[in-house]
Image (cartoon, rainbow, N blue to C red):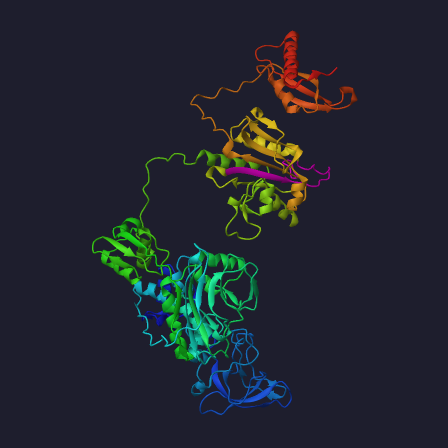
Amino acid sequence: MKFTFAWLKDHLDTTAPLDAITAKLASIGLEVEGVEDRGARLAAFTLARVVDAKQHPNADRLRVAQVEIAKGQPPVEVVCGAPNCRTGMIGVFAPLGTLIPGTGLTLEKKPVRGVVSNGMLCSERELELSDEHDGIIELDQSLAGRIGERYVDVMGLGDPVIEVKLTPNRPDCTGVRGIARDLAAAGLGKLKPEPQLGKIEGDYDCPVPIRLSFPPGEEHACSCFAGRVIQGIRNGPSPAWLQGRLKAIGQRPINAVVDITNYIQFDRGRPLHVYDANKINGGITARFARPGEKFLALDNKEYVCDGEMTVIADDGGHVHLGGIIGSYDTGSTEATTNVFIECAFFDPLRTAATGRRAGVQTDARYRFERGVDPAYVRPGLDLATSMMLEIVGGKPSKARVAGAPPSARTVIAFDFGHVPKLAGLDVKEADARRILEALGFAIEGKGPAVKVTAPSWRPDVHGAADLVEEVARIVGLETVPPAAMPRARGVTGMVLTETQRRARRVRRLLAARGFTEAVIWSFIPQPQAEHFGGGEAALELDNPISSEMTTMRPSLLPGLLTAAQRNRNRGFREVALFELGQVYRGDRPEDQLLIAGGVRDGAALTSGHGRHWDGSAADAGFFDVKADVVAALSALGIDASKAQMTRDAPGWYHPGRSATLRLGPKTVLAQLGEVHPETLRMLDVAGPVAAFEIFLDALPAEKRKTSKARPALVAQDLPAVRRDFAFVVDDAVAAGDLIKAAVGAERALITGATVFDVFTGASVGTGKKSIAIEVTIQPREKTLTDPEIEAVAGKIVAEVARATGGVIRG
């Protein structure tokens, strides 16, 4: 939000200097982003008059002008290439030695095609006022008496420009008057009363009918529409003071009627729109757009509407986006003689959604989506009418109003004792009352407990805490006395929850295993969400950041896989990434899960990766991510050897190189394996990639450690016995099931078993395979005799046969 210092003083009666104004704005929550003094930059430029302009003797496109730069002084000779340079015009002159802002050049006395130029007549682009450079600046003849005066003084450009950064909850400060109101409440002057308007209500009915046509329940899309016709205007350039104000804040003057509506938009935070009444066919209707409806906007771009957009249309099909941008077909020009002024109230949420879908950002949208003052519909129309009658003349009609603006009044039960309690400020009741009333709040009651009604321009105030905030920011948060927080005696106990402790341990463990943590958006494209088991309508975003972030993620893997590919695209090959975050399986609280997920891209292994003189590392596979999962579960107090590994991993994993780790039929601890080639192709990721997801919420509670001392480490002084067994089993039997059966045959003595060979062939039979294992038998108290060892071996053979149907290979 930009405004000039003099513009602020139109509403604020103050003698405070600029520095005090900017300091107070920052104190009351209106951050000052900058103050621009354009007067210093353009101080050397003055008004001048072309006394005579003739063709350059040596150039077809140049003219030699005699320019009067001060009263009573002889004219100076200037060479000018502008096509509009002519006798009698008034322009802007730069003397020798002047730095031209738009070009960065300093004027020197040099001949131009044999004629010496003693200065320069400037265009708007050369003064960095706009991009206009087709000709030099041409000023109104009414300024002929001010030849020699500084251009910035005549046009009001010497006035400092203040830029304020607004928070979204302060729509009242999108107009200069709202900012002046805050400063007056803070004691830096007095808010000037609203100007008294003359007779603006015409003697004839508005010839343009106004209709609101919305489905039942959707009337709030445009709840009120007011309009008035002014006939017989004399449109043209707006007055110099008005153009100066708009240029100072970066706006391009267009013509008088458009400039007036733009001025009111910044002066009062009230957007309006003006039509050429002769171009309106029939009446004006506020309605929802018809799907596919198109229109050419004032920015010379064509927009396609959908059925959710609010448009303003005439009977001939001319439309524009309500509260955002007008139609080129009904726009006013300097040839316009009859105008129709629109002042309406549009729903903030629908305006914001329409602007995002259309991809257009305007000053009107900026204000409507934050919430303009609903009570200023008719006053805004009257103010615009008054200014147009004063500047362009004409004969106004009676106002025509359709609908009514929202009139909900926010009444808050408030106790002035809340101020010291919530803000820590010792503010007298009289001072707090004065501040609230100066901000526009109406107060009923005389005691500490009162009723406070929020003004129509403050939609952000809802409760007592908001009122305390208003008092606190006006008094100044820097006046809050410092106070130490109460501190408990002794050392505080542990404050992390079990979930937080687990998350910390998993992060450290995965980082130690060579992973790099990634923090990825929780939003993914709809096709990816569907592929990974999600994509429910309840998880689609109403206002997505982009078309690539439309749905809440059901898995961490889409983000991790695409992140790994982005690293590979930038030359970082074979990375291992992990993320610890939330996934969403539905819209209920219990459908939000905490997961630790990771991917190993290519040859990203714990032992190193990439090319080496001793040979290239193998690609990461199932057993690498299995080791990651087992290590993570072990760090969390879970013995993975007691879990069941099944072959029902989701479809985005390779069906023969993946698994699900379970505790019982319902509790899923993790899913892991190589990613399916079709999934990689869908995500445009180069493989191979191995991945895993650990479901932290599903892990059983960690057993609390007892106060008993841990048993001492038992050092075995008896040698272990190792025996090999080869079992013939069906192809469908998993080696893990066979290992589990062998170890369980005699737990007191058997400490481990490993697979060292798998064989298939005609010698073992069709549909069969041979699995050879090495079993470690550890004596505890004495050396085992051969019969005792054979007894253990017999138990192993019997248990494997019972659990898997395996028989000893002959």
The N terminus: image quadrant: bottom left
The C terminus: image quadrant: top right
The picture places residue 732, in percent across and down from the top left corner, at 68, 25
Within the image, what quadrant is residue 27 found in? bottom left
Let me know if residue 612 is in the magenta part: yes
Q: Seen in the image, is 267 located left or right of residue 691?
A: left
- Looking at the image, which residue is at 65% across and 22% down? 754
Question: Which residue sits furthest left?
Answer: 446
Question: Which residue sits furthest right?
Answer: 762
Main SS category, magenta section: loop
Q: Seen in the image, is 435 located left or right of residue 204?
A: left
Q: Nearer the viewer, residue 738 or 195?
A: 195
The picture places residue 297, in percent across and down from the top left corner, at 54, 67
The picture places residue 530, in percent across and down from the top left corner, at 59, 43
Q: Is residue 579 visible?
A: yes
Q: Nearer the viewer, residue 582 or 775?
A: 582
Q: Seen in the image, is 76 located left or right of residue 479?
A: right
- Looking at the image, which residue is at 33% across and 40% down? 487
The picture places residue 506, in percent across and down from the top left corner, at 53, 35
Q: Is residue 153 visible?
A: no
Let me know if residue 499 is in the magenta part: no
Q: Which residues are magenta?
A: 592-620
Q: Relative to residue 92, is residue 706 depicted above or below?
A: above
Marks counted in the figure total: 0
Q: Nearer the viewer, residue 266 or 561?
A: 266
Q: Nearer the viewer, residue 398 or 179?
A: 398
